Image (cartoon, rainbow, N blue to C red):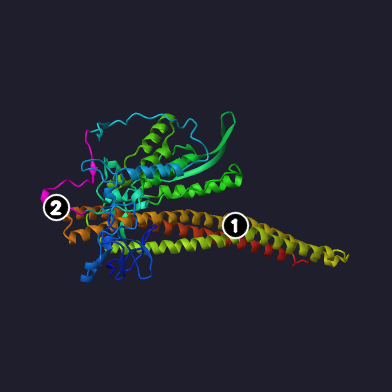
């Protein structure tokens, strides 16, 4: 008789090879021995895959115990029966006392660096390939500030006595998929207690308990930034051209000049550093036509939206690399700041060390419910924004093409009628002829109004939708990190209940999951705040422009109507 297991928690697969299951569902296991916290089985439909071992309970019977061979070979024949611990150099946790688990973090860094290209090469005076000497205060591997104080944050679990080690023989396993967002972001390494880094007071990010749940602490010095004067410039005696933008932050009032590749570099640094923050996407690149007026204008509008979201984010707006981007005007200082940002150690797993949470821990069941609700919300919002974007785009196309032509066609027909009437030489008909001709001109003008209008009311809506589609594309990864942390909590709870793990070790995993959960809910709360702000303002602008548009048409028609009073 095959060994069976009952599912005790719902599990939704998020990676290839995993199997979605529902509570109380019965699974047939392929092998009783778990592989790093995962069991392989099939459901009643015959679907086969991996489920977390802590999400199921094995159903044992005398017949099953007599007939089941626990030494059965796993499906993944390249994995030894003992799991990944038997493999050499494969995501093994570092010995106690060593620094953070860095392999996935470095891989994540390499991937980000590879993906984030730019329109141009880094071959101008704003960059070189040289390195920068260690920053002042970095002495002997420990950070020392100007007052001589040092800070070291670590999530390592200190060794216990022999008795505790016997009880804590079980450990929370690593994910089989080493390419999942949870792993590459450093979330897994942090939850498992492998993050270690220096955190200064200025680097700490505070999550506070607001009226609707965890929120990022507001920036006490808010500011904004304008983007003006896109200018075509050249270098290498005119062999290479680029567009520069003038950025003027309100908190310095000192303008700086930046190219698109500088924005692109900044985005790559921010996306790497903040795994649970939705960094807004930049406007898309374009291989050809980069110097056309329409493209430059459209890109500038996209960058303005992007900058607005950056300066209004409580965390991103205060980030050192963002402030460096906005304020640095000196060539040497730019290079030093760039190298410092690229060597930042508080990224990935170490980023979570910087987060300070409210004293009271969150209820994980409530957190899971909120996350699931937000996941459903983002899916619905993504579908609706795509539909609206397609509808608005089609409507704009009709206004600029079909509507314009139709109104012009009507206008030309009226003018043709007027010309026909002019063949009658009676003086009493001249007024009517002129009025009909004016009506034709009015309809042609209205056609031009339709052609010009989308840039005033529909294009801004599509720009906003494009920005939010970028945010919605970010949140599946953000949610995946939190879900991964919650899975580790459930695994540790099961080990404690079975007496295989010390309660203090499980509490450490709970605490670290609480940090990730607080940050995730704070980011969700910020998203909702700016969503309400942006869509309210944009809908008001759209309707105001529509009213003005139809008032303009009405005025033109009323002007034509008056011509008949004296006809």
Q: Position of residue 274 (x, y in %)?
A: 36, 47
Q: Left of 413 or right of it: where is 351?
A: left
Occupied quadrant, residue 130: top left
Q: Nearer the viewer, mark 1 or mark 2?
A: 2
CA distance for labels 1 and 2: 71 Å
Q: In terms of depth relative to the viewer, which is nearer, 92 or 207?
A: 92
Q: Quadrant of the C terminus?
A: bottom right
Question: Does residue 245 show up?
Answer: yes
Q: Position of residue 491 (x, y in %)?
A: 25, 58
Of the numbered discs in the image, which one, if any, rests on residue 142? none
Magenta stretch: includes residue 160:
yes
Magenta stretch: includes residue 551:
no
Residue on which disc 2 sits: 166
- Identify the residue shown where x is 42% and y is 44%: 112
Question: Tag 1: Cα neighbours inside 10 Å, few (<14), some, or many (≥20)?
Answer: many
Compared with 323, 542 (above or below) is below
Q: In terms of depth relative to the viewer, which is nearer, 75 or 160?
A: 75
Q: In terms of depth relative to the viewer, which is nearer, 32 or 416?
A: 32
Point out the stretch of residues depicted in magenta: 148-170
Compared with 80, 335 (above or below) is above
Judged from the image, the secondary structure of the residue bearing numbered disc 2 is: helix
Question: Does residue 355 show up?
Answer: no
Residue on which disc 1 sits: 454
Q: Left of 471 or right of it: where is 354?
A: left
């Amino acid at each position: 008789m095959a060994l069976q297991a009952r599912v005790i928690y719902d599990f939704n697969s998020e990676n290839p090879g995993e199997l979605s299951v529902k509570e109380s569902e019965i699974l047939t296991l392929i092998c009783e021995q778990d592989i790093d916290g995962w069991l392989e089985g099939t459901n009643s439909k015959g679907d086969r895959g991996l489920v977390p071992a802590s999400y199921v309970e094995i159903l044992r019977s005398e017949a099953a115990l007599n007939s089941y061979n626990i030494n059965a070979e796993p499906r993944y024949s390249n994995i030894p029966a003992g799991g990944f611990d038997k493999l050499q150099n494969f995501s093994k946790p570092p010995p106690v006392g060593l620094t953070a688990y860095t392999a996935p973090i470095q891989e994540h860094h390499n991937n980000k660096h590879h993906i984030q290209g730019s329109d141009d090469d880094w071959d101008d005076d704003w960059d070189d390939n040289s390195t920068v000497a260690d920053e002042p205060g970095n002495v002997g591997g420990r950070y020392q500030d100007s007052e001589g104080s040092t800070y070291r944050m670590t999530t390592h679990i200190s060794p216990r006595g022999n008795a505790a080690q016997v009880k804590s023989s079980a450990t929370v396993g690593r994910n089989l998929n080493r390419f999942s967002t949870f792993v590459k972001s450093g979330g897994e390494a942090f939850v498992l207690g492998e993050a270690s880094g220096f955190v200064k007071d200025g680097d700490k990010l505070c999550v506070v308990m607001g009226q609707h749940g965890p929120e990022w602490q507001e920036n006490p010095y808010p500011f904004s930034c304008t983007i003006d004067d896109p200018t075509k410039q050249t270098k290498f005696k005119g062999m290479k051209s680029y567009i520069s933008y003038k950025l003027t932050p309100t908190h310095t009032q000192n303008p700086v000049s930046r190219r698109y590749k500088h924005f692109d570099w900044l985005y790559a640094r921010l996306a790497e550093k903040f795994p649970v923050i939705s960094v807004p996407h930049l406007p898309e690149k374009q291989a050809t036509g980069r110097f056309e007026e329409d493209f430059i204008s459209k890109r500038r509008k996209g960058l303005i939206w992007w900058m607005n979201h950056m300066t209004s984010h409580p965390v991103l707006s205060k980030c050192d690399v963002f402030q460096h981007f906005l304020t640095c005007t000196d060539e040497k200082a730019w290079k030093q700041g760039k190298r410092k940002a690229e060597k930042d150690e508080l990224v990935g797993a170490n980023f979570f060390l910087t987060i300070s949470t409210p004293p009271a821990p969150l209820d994980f069941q409530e957190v899971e419910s909120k996350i699931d609700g937000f996941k459903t919300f983002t899916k619905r919002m993504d579908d609706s924004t795509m539909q609206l974007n397609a509808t608005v785009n089609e409507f704009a196309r009709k206004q600029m093409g079909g509507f314009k032509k139709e109104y012009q066609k009507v206008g030309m027909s009226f003018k043709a009628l007027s010309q026909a009437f002019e063949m009658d030489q009676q003086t009493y008909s001249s007024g009517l002829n002129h009025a009909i001709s004016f009506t034709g001109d009015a309809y042609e003008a209205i056609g031009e109004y339709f052609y010009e209008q989308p840039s005033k009311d529909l294009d801004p809506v599509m720009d906003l939708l494009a920005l939010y589609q970028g945010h919605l594309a970010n949140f599946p990864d953000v949610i995946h990190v939190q879900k991964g942390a919650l899975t580790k909590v459930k695994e540790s709870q099961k080990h404690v209940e079975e007496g295989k793990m010390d309660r203090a070790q499980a509490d450490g995993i709970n605490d670290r999951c609480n940090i990730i959960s607080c940050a995730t809910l704070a980011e969700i709360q910020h998203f909702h705040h700016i969503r309400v702000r942006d869509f309210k303002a944009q809908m008001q602008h759209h309707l105001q422009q529509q009213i003005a548009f139809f008032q303009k048409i009405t005025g033109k028609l009323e002007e034509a109507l008056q011509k008949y009073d004296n006809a």
